[in-house]
Image: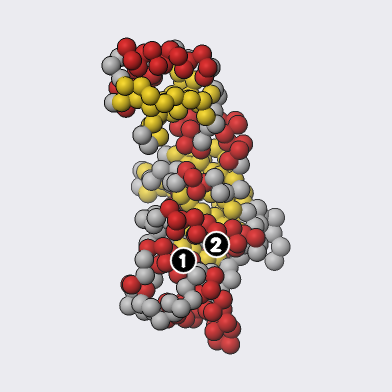
Amino acid sequence: MSVAYAVETAGLTRRFGDFVAVNKVSFQVQPGEVFGFLGPNGSGKSTTIRMLCGLIAPTEGSGHVLGLDIASEAEAIRARIGYMSQKFSLYPDLTVHENLRFYASVYGVPRRERAARMAELTAMAGLTGREDSLTSTLSGGWRQRLALACAIVHRPQVLFLDEPTSGVDPEARRAFWDLIYAMAADGVTVFVTTHFMDEAEHCHRIGLMYGGNLIALDTPAGLKRLAVDGEVLEIEGDPQDSARSLIAALPGVYSVAPHGARLHAIVDNASQRSESILTTLRNGGVVAGHIEQIEPSLEDVFVAMVTAQR
């Protein structure tokens, strides 16, 4: 079946009593796109995915996956998608191949195709030689790859990944994203939620969620270009809290936020503000070190967008 959009929503809303978890969210996802939902915990990302997968019903609005209505055709949708939740239900007392065989059966993969499909997925996930290993003995990164293999055993057209790399090391996260790109290259639409800003850079387009609202939607480059009104300075100051307060009070400074051990300040003129920031920090008893203008990151974009919402 050919459809204009792999995923489409219009005014999608979900309430839990008086609490609005998702508020009138509208967007479209192209077939074969890697689409990211970026936002902090509690912003409505997982609730949106659960509605799109037919796991909970919307309170208002509409949504379609592969042209199927999420409210009335949820069962048909679930047969055509893959879903990997934050706590994907692998069976720890089963081996790698036993888990794959179980999910192949659940998803209705024909018996004559299962052995070849399991071998293909085992190789894709880098688990060749570990087929008989108990899942409980695998590291977090290997379990994550196995979970992905189980989610796509039936060759879904759309893959929903809800915070798929939480709790795994950076190397495992990079390997996981290599697998995602390989699937997208084969035409699979990938819808992924994350709160890792660096992961969102891998997406073709990103929707920024905050407080249940979709506050921005564009490519990573487009968001950086349009959302950050000013220039970004990266600043090192100790103690950081004092440095942040001093910088925030200066004229021409739009926002200041911590980025690891350093601060990012969005200012009207980076070259002009650098000297006044250093002077202010030193006069305020802060040990000031590194300061330079940098290109805005998605975290800068998110801080700017959230600040504008308040």
Which type of secondary structure does the marked residue at label 2 adopt?
helix
Instruction: Relative to 220, say whether 192 is above or below.
Output: below
| Residue at the (42%, 39%) spot, across then down | 211
Question: Percent x, y for residue 151?
Answer: 49, 68
Q: How many marks do you count on the picture?
A: 2
Question: Disc 1, disc 2: CB below 8 Å?
Answer: yes
Q: Disc 2 designates what residue?
A: 179
Left or right, 295 with reference to 44? right
The residue that appears at 56% across and 76% down in the rendered structure is 120
Q: Is residue 134 visible?
A: yes
Q: Secondary structure at mark 1?
A: helix
Q: Amino acid at mark 2?
A: Leu
Instruction: For the N terminus, give its image quadrant.
Output: bottom right
Separation of marks 1 and 2 at Cα, in angstroms: 9 Å
Q: Amino acid at mark 1?
A: Arg
> Which numbered dot is residue 269?
none
Taking the spot 62% from the left edge, 59% from the top edge, the residue there is 184
Position of the C terminus by quadrant = top left
Say which of 197 and 305 sits in front.
197
**What mark, if any, has residue 145 been given in the picture?**
1
Q: Position of residue 6 (x, y in %)?
A: 63, 57
- Mark 2 neighbour class, 10 Å CA radius: few under 14, some 14 to 19, many 20 or more: some
Residue 201 against residue 121 in the figure, above or below: above
Q: Is residue 308 visible?
A: no
175 over 253 or under it: above or below: below
